[in-house]
Structure formats: structure tokens, C-alpha cells
Amino acid sequence: MKNSLSVDFNANASALYVIAALVILYVLAQSVFFLIRALKQSKKIGMDKAVIKRTARRAAIFSIAPAISIFIGVAALAPKLGIPLPWLRLSVIGSLVYETSAAEIGAKSMNVPWESFTATTITAEQFVTIAMIMSIGCLLPLVMVGFFTKKYSSGMLKMEKKDKKWGEILSNAMFMGVVSCFFATNFTKVTTGLAGWIPVFIILISATVMIIFGVIQKATKWRWINDYALPVSMIVGMVCSVPIYNAIV
Amino acid sequence: MKKIDFNRKNHTYSENTHFYGRIWSVVSVVMMMVFPIAAGAIFDAWPTAQAIGIGITGILIYWAAGAVEFISYTPLLGATSVYLGFVTGNLSNLKVPCALSCLDAENVKASTDEGDIIATVSTAVSSIVTILVIIFGVILIAATPLAELLAKPAAQKAADYLLPALFGALAVVYISRNPKIAFPPVILMVVLCIAIPKIEGVISILVPFVAIFTVGVARIMYKKGWLDDKKQKAAPVAIDEGENASAITEATSDDENKENDID
């Protein structure tokens, strides 16, 4: 094991902030690049500007609650890994579940219990090992996207064109398959007692808020309200989890 | 060896999407490794081969999950969004529902030209907003005592329950819109998750099988004519976020059902 450090290690070192910022800037640049291309193409094919504006507004509003939640994930990992690494990992590719598990796997690979890590006691070698494993873990999908998207998406397009009606049903069915998996995982703990029902209660609350939004929209004909239905339902569900959790657990 | 044409002016938007998408993806693979390699170089600390070997064995399941995400999400997002979304991440909890919600709102499909543009704008804006919110938060926790507040159980609990809060709301939209397609996988997976709770650990791997199951059931219904517009029964509550449709429609006639994608 190497212990001779050329620079004193600190999980919150300025240099780490700079590297994380550079990689995040690259991802930001990619988003801006594809956004500009899409805007140019929308003009070319004569799409209504209002559609693009509405889409941008919807996406922005929709993203705020999950973004705050992802940021809370950064704050959750920061006491163990410092701020720059979780900031980078959760801003690009990752998700909290994956990053936390990958970090734990990194800790296990060195036979060090994850619980014992803190941002002040972690060594440079432990830090770099965890960062390396978290990064390697996300490479395969990127390689697949780079090499197979063209073939795969063209194949799907051909299939959809062959039978348009079935094409629509196919993509809806695929999405429902995906959604049902994530939806159902909230039921895995219902046999463990009342605490296991908390995710189900949250589902019911956010679903109810969603329905209330629909009823208000129908009664008032305010179409703009639709843009807030999903984000607000999400936030209400998340906020309600705190008193429900405190009351039950 | 095939010569790469760098003059892209005579190529279509779709061809250029793949051309640029591939370049960004390949560079992204390199960029993802910049942080650990640079950190290793700066602090002169490198992982042992053994630790990396054990670590890679541990993360194989995430490679499988990533491959599954690619297979499942590509038909839903369209090519441009796939190139972008897989680099920016947080697909199932943010980018995919966000893009689908935007596509639904305009009543277009990702496989059309308009749909590809809408999905791209949605994914790009969502990525930019997410990155900016996190930067703002990082500045706050680096410079203020907010970190202590966020480390409190209440904030962590609220963040833990993002997924049920998101999928509860989404379920209302999608189950009410396509009840016949939605119920078989939802019932199957809820029963499986209650009966075998450990299934949660391998749920990412199960996704394509459940998707195939759902497509199979939908195919049977389609062939039998159960998904035809006229035969599709009204959902008790059909939510449509479309500008051209009301948010909640207590569908009472066949004509009303035609507003929906499939119904």
C-alpha cells in the first residue's frame, strides 16, 4: 500500500472541486449542444415555437423536485466521501441508489466497513478506489449507447412503421412494463408491519393529489395547472413521508 | 476501413444525431474516468489491482442493469435523448418520466421528428436544471450549515420517498390511460414483490422480462381486438395532460376515448 502522498489528501480538496466541475461542465456542454441542434431542427421542420417553450417550461418545473432530492443525496454522501465526488457522481450518469451501492462495493473491495468511513478519516487510496469503482460501474451503458443506439433505434422505427397502431401499443406496453417494476418495489415490505406500508401510503397520497389536480383542471379549464400536477404531487408525497414516518416508526 | 465523413452538411438530422451522439458517448467514457485518475495522480494514491478486481465483480449487476436500461428506454426516448440521457443519468427517477410527460402533453410519440425534438428539449432542459440545482445546493452546503440540516433524518426520509411519490402520481396517469395494458404487469409485479420481497435486489434485471411479458399480453389483446378504439372500455378516470384534451375526463363515450393514444 502506498502512503507517501505528494499532496496532503482531503476529500474536499479544491483540486477535486475543479476536476468535478470540469466533468460536469462537459456534460452541461453536451446538453446545450443537443438542445441547440433540436431548436434549429424544430425551426427547419416548421414546429410551433410555443410547443418548444411549453416543453422547456414543463421539463424545468418537473425536474426541480427530483433535482432537490438528488442534491439531498449529495448531502447524504458528503459526510462520508466529501462533497466533490458525490456532486460529480450524482450530476452525471448516476442515481443515488446506484452510487451509494457502488461506493459500498468499493469499501468492501478493501475490506473496510462502509459505516466506518468519514470524509475526514478516509485515506487517499480508499477515496480513489471508491471513485474508480463508482466510475467503472457506469461505463457499460455508455459504450452500448455509443455503439448500438443507431442499429437498435432504427430497428424499432422500422417495426413501428410496419404497423403503426401496434407500434404505439408496443412502446406503451414496454413503458408500462418498466413502470410496473419500479412501482411494485414499493410493496416489498408490506408484510413486515405498518412501517412497511409507508411507501404505499405515499403512493396513495401523491396519486390522490394528482387526481385532485385533474378535478380542479376539469372544473376550471386551467390547462396551465397540468404542468404543476406531477411535480406538486411528488413534493406533497415526499413532505408527507416525514410525519407519517415519525408517527409510525 | 470505412472513411469517416466529417463534412456533416449533406447529412440528415437523424444521421448527424448518431454521428455526434457517438462522438459524445466515446468522449464521455473517457471523461467519466478523469476524476478517479486525476485524483490518483494528484494524491499519488492508486487502488490495488485486487481491490479493483473485487469491485468490478461487485458492480457487474449494475452493468447488467445499465444494459437493461438501454434496451428498455431507447424505444421510449428516441435516439437523441438516449445519447444525452445516458450521460446525464437519473433516467428512471427523472429523465424518462419527464420526457414522456412532455411527449404526452403534446400528444406526440418519440419516434416522430417532432417527438424526437420534444424529448431532446425535455432531457436537455431537465439535465441543465438538475445540474444547476445541484450546483446551487453544493455552494450552500460548502458555505453554510445547511449540510447539517440536510443530514437530519427528516430530510433524508423525504428524499428516500421520492420514488413512491413519483410513481404514485405517474400510476394515476398511465393506469387510467391504458388500464388494459397496465393492469397485467402491475398486478403481476405487486404480487411478486409482496410474495418474494428479495426480488427488489434484482428488479433492474427483471425489467426487460416484465416488459416482454407486458408486450406479449398487449399483443394477444391487440390480436383479439380488445385494444380497438371502439371496444376499449372507458377508464373510470382518464387523465390526459395534452393541450388538446382535458386533464381529467370521465370518459362516457367511445368518441371521447379516441382522444387518448391507445384508448
Image: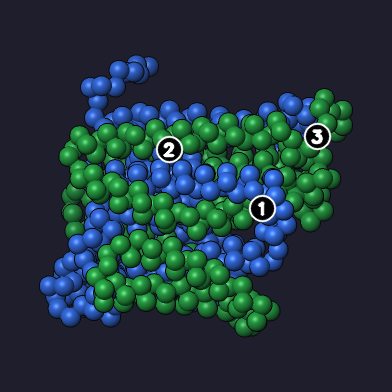
Chain colours: A green, B blue
**Residue under circle 1?**
A75
Rendered location of residue B128, percent (x, y): 46, 43
Specify the amino acid type for callout 1.
Ala
- Nearest the viewer among B81 and B29 is B81
Q: Do badges 3 and 2 share one subunit?
A: yes
Quadrant (top left/top right/bottom left/bottom right) for the C terminus of chain A: bottom right
Give coordinates of residue A130: x percent, y percent.
71, 42
The total number of labels drawn is 3
Q: Residue at x 44, y 66 (%)?
A: A232
Q: Which subunit holds the residue at mark 2? A: A
Considering the image in quadrants, where does the N terminus of chain A appear? top right
Taking A155 as reference, is A4 above or below it? above
Q: Residue at x 49, y 43 (%)?
A: B88
**Residue B258 vertical position relative to residue B149 in the rendered view, above or below:** below
> Is disc 1 on the same chain as disc 3?
yes
Amino acid type shown at disc 2: Ser
State whether residue B60 appears in this view: no
